[in-house]
Amino acid sequence: MTSERAAFGALLRELRMARSLTIEGLSEASGVSVRGIGDLERGRRAAPQRRTVAALADGLELSEAERERLLASARSGRSPAYSPAGAQALPRGIADFVGRGQELGRLAEFAERAAGGAVSGESVESGSPVAHPVVVAVSGSPGTGKTTLALHAGRRLAGRFPDGQLVLDLRGTDENPPAPAELMLVVLKAFGLPDRDLAKAGPEGHPGLYRQMLAERRCLLILDDARDEAQVRPLLPGAGAGMVVVTSRRMLTGLESVHRMPLGELSGEEAAAFLSSLVGAGRAAADPAALADVARRCAHLPLALRVAGNWLATRTGWTVRRLADRLAREERRLDALSAGDVRVVAAFDLSYRQLTSAAACMFRRLSLVPGPDVSTACAAQLTGQDLFDAEDTLEELVEAGLLGTDRDRYRLHDLLGLYARSRLAAEEGADETDRARATMYRWLLETAVVAGRWYEPDHGAPPATWQGMVDLSSADRARAWLQAEGTNWLAALRAAAAAGEHATVVEVAESLHWFSDQWIFWGHWPEIFDSAARSAQALGDPLLEATQLNYHAWALLICESRPRDSLVRSAQALAAAEHAGDLGQQAWAHHYGSWAHRVLDEPDEGADHNERAARLFEAAGDLHGVLQSRHVRALILAGRDRHEEAIAAYQDMLAWLGQVGPGIEPHVADMARLGAHGGIGTSYSRLRQWDKAVFHLRTATRICRSGGNIALESRQLTDLSEALLAAGRPAQAREVLVRCLSLGPDADPQRVLRARQQLARLDAG
């Protein structure tokens, strides 16, 4: 059977190639779908019916002799489509199948459950238990290898289904896919039901025969490329010890009592192994870095990897690096991912053409999002929809397999993003595109200002007049939004700077100044405040310039550990502040200078700058600055090994903070308490008073955790672990170190390294 199918496919391809027609060309000439022709040529489908052969013959403009030859080949391929019990009706396997171990394991478990008879309920007639078949819905974006997985699993599991294995192509991406009644008839004939029985039952009786036949057989039914729930639901048997695997680009959310198996891209290791199997181990090993680049530029998508691998396999003169470089150009990558009649773009086209106009517009414009993912509120800015309509549209894209989700955010696969960008360029004008992007960027920056001001003195919660699309009702929610949309609002800020929108750049940076303490190691604060300082200079405002220069001095010192460069910026800030006649920014310039000198182990210079800062803060009435100068004074004392005095200074600072009360913004006060308890704990450690050290360092850690400050928590945890070890509490120290290593990318990388080294020493005894 398979050989006859392959013979028809080979003949069809021979006739097409003789006329120099592509599959797309033959599809246009004959009216048969691209997918259908491709499957016929590869032997993936049974030979077509006479009307389809006639359409292909007309499209090929065959002579009478050639037409008869093609019809004869089709007739031979249609002799009993599938034998009954024991049939191995699966197309040939994929010899280079790689990965999907977890999915194959789950399918094997489901097959075992089906073969054992998944029992549910009782028969009404007999009262005996009723076995229900297992149904698995495999869904995923175009090109993720859903069909390949189903067929590979089917061949592996064939022995568990002795009554047959059958694959049905539901042609879900065709304009007119087959109806359930037509598909039922195919299955009934495939399992050898006599024509007289079919005629006797009539079309209205076929569903009953279909259900009875599947209930009586232990078989595997693969429903490939399903259009939607309406096409699949009538084909799902209600009883029996069989198994049904449905593959679809859609999630088929409406189906009930199914096991869902979403497919994504391969892992990096799986993608490299897949490419190696296609191009040869020796060639892959010659340049593993280039192989990894090819895999990454294919976004680990199985279809793209196969195209790239086949390209290299048929071009032995090409190095892997040459293809990697060819794929490096994003604007040409999709065009490059074609091999023969297999094109990645063609797979995407099929899904895109089935979208509603609103979903197609959203899909195109999502390519304007600069970050890896987006929220519903941000996406709504691109299309002008309200929040609920935008969510419905995004969910349509998710259901269609064109958009992924990560909790409450949406993500375009890399290659789908390039495809969306190409459709945007082809279908929308530059002015329309620019307006959509500008609307999104404006909203991102306006929301960033409101969110950041939660942490700013004299601001806090959004004003009552603010009508936002996101919930910023608490500082924690504001922080979560700023971090989740960080890549996106940063891109908007860069665009504003490039466009010369200097007032906007300064406003955004100013609103985020105190928030930056909450996300120290994000990696972009030096860029943000440097850009704002240049914008302030362009505005010709020395006070704004001094302020942003001071912020930049902080970022260089704390975020990048560049105290010498920080001193340069604080000196520039001091000059600008003196020019503006502003005592407050003069004080802050001295404050950051003091801090940098202390880091450089220059305590005398640090003390001098701090004393100047303290006097200026007092004169300016800046309570937040006074608090900072008190903190630095204690740090300087500790740096001179005068720890008893340092502890007293920290305690005075805490007492002063209690007296001032509401005059200090709550988040600033929390940071000060954190610094005080951390400093007291460190000084007690130097005095070898371990119990007191542990108490204060634990207090500092709790403050960090309650405020969500990951960076500073990592610092306190490493100090706490050292105190615990010195106090003879290794088990507690281990717990603390494990916690530090679990904090993620926002932790201080140097402290994470130290924690890993300490843990290794503990493991080594």
Image (cartoon, rainbow, N blue to C red):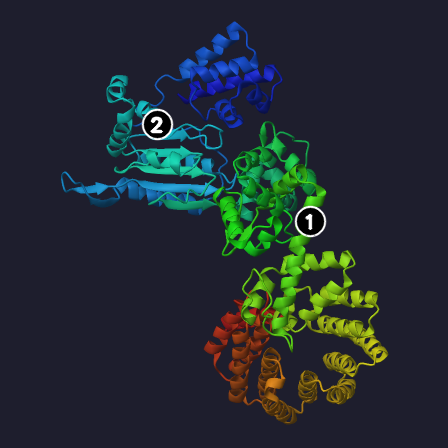
* Other-residue count near label 2 (Cα within 10 Å), few / some / many at <14 / 14–19 / ≥20: some
Depth check, mark 1 against mark 2: the one in front is: 1
Which corner quadrant holds the N terminus? top left
Element carrying mark 2? helix
Q: Position of residue 414 (x, y in %)?
A: 60, 46
Element carrying mark 1? helix
Q: CA distance from mark 1 to mark 2?
A: 49 Å
Rendered residue at 58%/52% (across/down):
380
Rendered residue at 48%/23% (across/down):
40
**The quadrant where residue 101 appears:** top left
Vertical arrangement, residue 60 with respect to residue 603, above or below: above
Q: Nearer the viewer, residue 27 or 452?
A: 452
Vertical arrangement, residue 36 with respect to residue 635, above or below: above
**The quadrant where residue 618 appears:** bottom right
Q: Residue 435 has which mark?
A: 1
Q: Position of residue 627 (x, y in %)?
A: 66, 86
Q: Residue 181 has which mark?
A: 2
Q: Earlier in the sequence, mark 1 or mark 2?
A: 2
Rendered residue at 55%/76% (across/down):
704
Horizontally, residue 568 falls left or right of residue 362, namely right
* Circle 1/circle 2 CB separation < 8 Å: no
Vertical arrangement, residue 569 with respect to residue 584, above or below: above
The three-letter amino acid code for the residue at tag 2 is Ala
* Other-residue count near label 1 (Cα within 10 Å), few / some / many at <14 / 14–19 / ≥20: few
Q: Nearer the viewer, residue 280 or 434?
A: 434
Q: Nearer the viewer, residue 441 or 97?
A: 441
Residue reaching furthest to the top: 64
